[in-house]
Image (cartoon, rainbow, N blue to C red):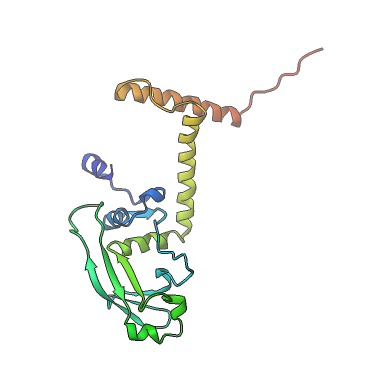
Amino acid sequence: MLTRVKEKFGLVPDWMIADTAYGSGPMLGWLVERKIDPYIPVIDKAGRPDGTWTRTDFDWDAENNQYICPEGHALKQFRRNYSDPNRGPTGKGTARYRALKEVCQVCPSKQKCCPNADARKITREEHEDARQVARDLAKTEEYQTAMKLRKKVEMLFAHLKRILGLSRLRLRGPCGANDEFLLAATAQNLRKLAKIFPASQQTRKA
């Protein structure tokens, strides 16, 4: 949709609001590459059920292409499976980083890091930088404002579907759908106006 709007009208948004379904790495990477700020919750499955350190506990050293663990040890890249970067926003690739076995075996924090493995391994997605951009934006006041705006818009659509019964369009064609939706939106706005400006109560004479 963004591509069609750009081609037809020459418009490119500065930011975009969406729910978690759009928070995948490839989608965030596609937006960041086009300098569109993604106010989108990130799909993150880095959590570990055993309570050990997650990937977010490790510092990323972009200059040396490595992770640094909380104890100060480096995790070097040992495998890379990045796919074709020209395939668009649906691609997916990973790079794997691993610490030295002899370092992890004598580390005092091994039970917090990798109690059931010889050495700690970390997977980094191809669009992890874009995911981090989205995480940083989520800490701003603009993000909170964007989430409130998204909630207001989605509540209007939910009201049309559940209260006004617009679960599906009954008129055919773009013109019919446009007319039906405008009528439903008009009814919705009239309901809102009735709450803002209630009818005056006239006193009746005995």
Residue 81 pos. (x, y %): 22, 65
Please state which of residues 116 and 44 is positioned toward the viewer in this rendering.
Answer: 116
Residue 25 pos. (x, y %): 32, 57
Q: In this view, does 135 lie above or below 17?
A: below
Horizontal placement of 85 versus 11: left or right?
left
Quarter of the picture containing the C terminus is top right
Q: In this view, does 111 lie above or below 80?
A: below
At x 24% / y 45%, what residue is drawn? 3
Q: How many marks?
A: 0
Residue 176 pos. (x, y %): 34, 21
Quarter of the picture containing the N terminus is top left
Residue 128 pos. (x, y %): 32, 64
- Residue 34 found in image quarter: bottom left
Extreme residue toward the right, this view: 206
Extreme residue toward the top, this view: 206
At x 33% / y 79%, what residue is drawn? 99
